[in-house]
Amino acid sequence: MANSEAAIIVGFWLWVCIYMTKGLNAGEVTYDGTSLIVNGTRKLLISGSIHYPRSTPQMWPGLIDKAKEGGLNCVQTYVFWNMHEPEQGKFNFEGRSDLVKFVKLIHSRGMYVSLRIGPYIEAEWNFGGFPYWLREIPGIIFRTDNEPFKREMQRFTEMIANMMKRENLFASQGGPIIVAQIENEYGIVEPSFREGGRSYVRWAANMAIELNTNVPWIMCKQPDAPNPIINTCNGLYCGDTFDGPNSNKKPKMWTENWIGWFQVFGGAKHHRPVENIAYAVARFYAKNGTFVNYYMYHGGTNFGRSGGPFITASYDYDAPIDEYGNEREPKWSHLKDLNTAIMRCSQTLLSARAETFSLGSSQEAHVYRGHSGQCAAFLSNMNPTSGVTLNFQNMTYSLPAWSVSILPDCKTVVFNTANVNAQSKTHNLTSNNPQRKLKSSYFLSNKEVEKGFYWETFKEKIGGSEDTQFDNKGLLEHINTTKDTTDYLWYNIRVDVDENEPFIRSNSSLVLAIGSHGYAVHVFVNDHFSGSAHGNKSNPGFSLNLHISLRPGKNDISLLSVMVGLPDSGAYFERKTAGISSVMIQGFKGGSRDYSQELWAYQIGLVGEKQNIFTKNGSRTVNWNPSISDQHLTWYKTTIDAPEGDGPISLDLRSMGKGQIWINGESVGRYWIIFLVPLGDCSTCDYRGSWNLKKCATNCGQPSQTLYHIPRSLLQPTGNLLVLFEEVGGEPSKISLLTDLKNY
Ligand SMILES: *[C@@H]1O[C@H](CO)[C@@H](O)[C@H](O)[C@H]1NC(C)=O
Ligand SMILES: *[C@@H]1O[C@H](CO)[C@@H](O)[C@H](O)[C@H]1NC(C)=O
Ligand SMILES: *[C@@H]1O[C@H](CO)[C@@H](O)[C@H](O)[C@H]1NC(C)=O
Ligand SMILES: *[C@@H]1O[C@H](CO)[C@@H](O)[C@H](O)[C@H]1NC(C)=O
Ligand SMILES: *[C@@H]1O[C@H](CO)[C@@H](O)[C@H](O)[C@H]1NC(C)=O
Ligand SMILES: *[C@@H]1O[C@H](CO)[C@@H](O)[C@H](O)[C@H]1NC(C)=O
Ligand SMILES: *[C@@H]1O[C@H](CO)[C@@H](O)[C@H](O)[C@H]1NC(C)=O
Ligand SMILES: *[C@@H]1O[C@H](CO)[C@@H](O)[C@H](O)[C@H]1NC(C)=O
């Protein structure tokens, strides 16, 4: 280390000391190697992620109360830039975007807030949280040392920080925000940007510090986080895998403890057994950790088109509070017991450091001894297959395989991570057939309140409306053509066929060969549906070869390209492309014809979208047909009454194909039923050993999501307009409305 560097480091810690001393007087939040310190008091923090746009303001109080009752003292959320600034300079902080209201509610319950401003957030959210317009700024490159990007990032971050200050929401002002995050898991992409990445990290750190929020800043998955930013862990086993903060003067924090996993269309449901989570959390607090955040504590719903690529409308995440706002048992109760046990140790954990003692080949004790004689211990059995009986301080303890016992007084076990005492009503996690067990419990108590609605239909125009088409030579890129105003883009071409083509008489098949960068396409030849294809989360692109029949003269080929969320991750994700990339017809007399560079007619979005036919007024602008006709590209409309009671409501769409749902004009999400989970992607729910995505997955051979959340607050008692746009076809007569969703 050069002398100058040493001088800078010494200078820095001197500054931290002064800053901290000042902090103690001013009510600021500071930290040291043990913990965050709020207005002079050390804090042991148990946090849970609840993302405000993934539920409704009407649900927020109940969710926050359940978090508090579940033993949390902090709520963590991202800030969703593209919700707040959908158009550059035009802001939205209303309804589900009312960040200030959400933070104040948490404050009113006496809880703290961890605010992850990002503003890059990933979060399985459309474009990783960035507004579409950001991509169109000339010369912009996301998340690197790029002036246009840094200017916008700084402007938004400053705006959020100033808004929080104006409302006195930072802890230094008496508010609940005790920590803030800049960037998000940047360490993963930093090497792709080389020197630009390293200087961007320093810039982001300085920019955040200069906002003078008087709360510490964190960067997750960022081992080189510059001082005084705290680098934190995201993962499954941060107690055992995290190298720790990059200075022993920073506390050990776990910002994302993955409680389950998100679901993609075509992907299984992932369940992380609560014994496994509890084990991981206990290990972290056993080893000097003082902040753990459950990601997610309530996952919620990706309403509208807010989900990221191939992400389901449900963001349930197998969280302790399910998508609908109910406690998921035994997860919620077991974690409550765990959180209570950890909190009983808090004074000791905050006043001492963990000493480790071996108790066997894969057994150990972590013991905290305070100056005034307090003692707390964690006994771990890391053996994944066998339980043990062991001796600790002259006493005998039995520990099941892969478990941790918590002893707040170093004598009495108040909690063991593998003993689920909470009233388990549902999952039998040791069952060999988790799928059947889990599935039956999902639907057991759901009450089907209505079925067989009276549907009217409106047929979407194949190829779009001639009035709104425009031409372009060659195939346009989907994302920068639609600018994320819709999922849909029509590519239309008229193909001339000479009547002397031999295939017309002999019917030798023609093949329409389509290449696409993603994500799905529906093909129509002369207004008749000919076929569909789609990619998947890991491979959005695909190709499709379709046998088609053409007639002599003019033939219309119309391709409806469909997106399911903009890219949300990876270096240079702003450059990722989608849409049709090549179109050929093979089998003509003269060989193949390539139409990729020809003149195409385009329409952005659907006629029904342009007319807003999912709104009460818009629905009056078209003629609805009382009979259910051709199933492709059909709008369905009905009127529903709110089911009795105040429980959550869901639409069972298992009889349908793919599309989007609107209730009283508001989109509540995309659905996709026909894309099934591959057989063989499921596995038993064993909690022992290192859990991974393959370890407890259900739903094979089934659609990823069949039940779709309709927030009760969107419904009037009667006369609610329910509209679906169905791309493929299905049986709307079998759609039903469910309520009393429990153990979903
Ligand atoms: C910090 O603590 C002091 C002493 O307990 C108290 O008077 C002050 O109001 C607190 N400041 C804040 C911002 O909570
Ligand atoms: C806890 O921190 C102390 C002091 O830094 C250190 O000596 C000890 O090894 C740490 N324990 C664990 C389990 O990381
Ligand atoms: C354990 O027992 C031995 C012998 O009886 C005694 O010397 C020792 O102090 C005891 N240790 C503790 C922690 O109680
Ligand atoms: C759970 O399943 C296992 C294996 O099928 C069975 O032995 C056990 O009795 C079940 N437990 C409960 C509480 O149903
Ligand atoms: C749209 O994207 C394509 C592919 O990345 C690119 O070639 C084209 O220049 C872009 N057009 C506009 C208007 O940005
Ligand atoms: C013509 O080709 C189509 C598509 O391959 C096939 O379905 C149809 O039966 C054929 N018709 C005749 C008369 O061979
Ligand atoms: C995704 O698509 C690729 C390419 O078509 C295929 O190889 C892969 O099996 C698919 N993955 C899943 C999970 O369906
Ligand atoms: C719907 O139409 C009514 C009557 O024409 C009008 O008063 C109202 O403003 C319209 N609402 C919207 C949202 O356009």
Image (cartoon, rainbow, N blue to C red):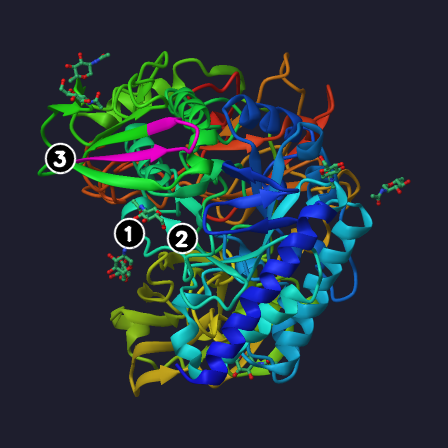
Classed neighbour count for the residue bearing mark 1: other residues with Cα under 10 Å, few (<14), some (14–19), many (≥20): few
Give the residue displayed 59% in from the left and 18% down from the top: 647
Question: Is residue 504 on the magenta stretch?
Answer: no
Give the residue displayed 63% in from the left and 12% down from the top: 645
Three-letter amino acid code of the residue under disc 2: Cys
User: Could you tell me which secondary element the residue under label 2 belongs to?
Assistant: strand
Classed neighbour count for the residue bearing mark 3: other residues with Cα under 10 Å, few (<14), some (14–19), many (≥20): some
Q: Quadrant of residue 2?
A: bottom left
**Please, is residue 710 above or below residue 645 in the view?**
below
Q: Classify the position of the N terminus by image quarter.
A: bottom left
* Ligand 7 lies in quarter: bottom left
Q: Classify the position of the C terminus by image quarter.
A: top left
| Gap between marks 1 and 2 measured at Cα | 9 Å
Prevalent SS, magenta region: strand
**Please, is residue 172 above or below residue 59 in the view?**
below
Asked whether disc 1 touches disc 3, contact meaning CB atoms under 8 Å apart, the reply is: no
Asked whether disc 1 touches disc 2, contact meaning CB atoms under 8 Å apart, the reply is: yes
Of residue 176 and residue 14, the one placed in the foreground of this image is 14
| Residue span colored magenta | 363-376
Give the residue displayed 59% in from the left and 31% down from the top: 710
Percent position of residue 674, x then y: 37, 43
Three-letter amino acid code of the residue under disc 1: Thr
Question: Is residue 371 on the magenta stretch?
Answer: yes
Percent position of residue 70, x then y: 50, 24
Of residue 554 and residue 487, the one placed in the foreground of this image is 487
* Mark 3 lies within 8 Å of ligand 2 (Cβ measured): no
| Gap between marks 3 and 2 measured at Cα | 24 Å
Percent position of residue 635, x then y: 59, 43
Q: Which residue is mark 2?
A: 233
Q: Which residue is mark 3?
A: 383
Q: Which residue is mark 1?
A: 241
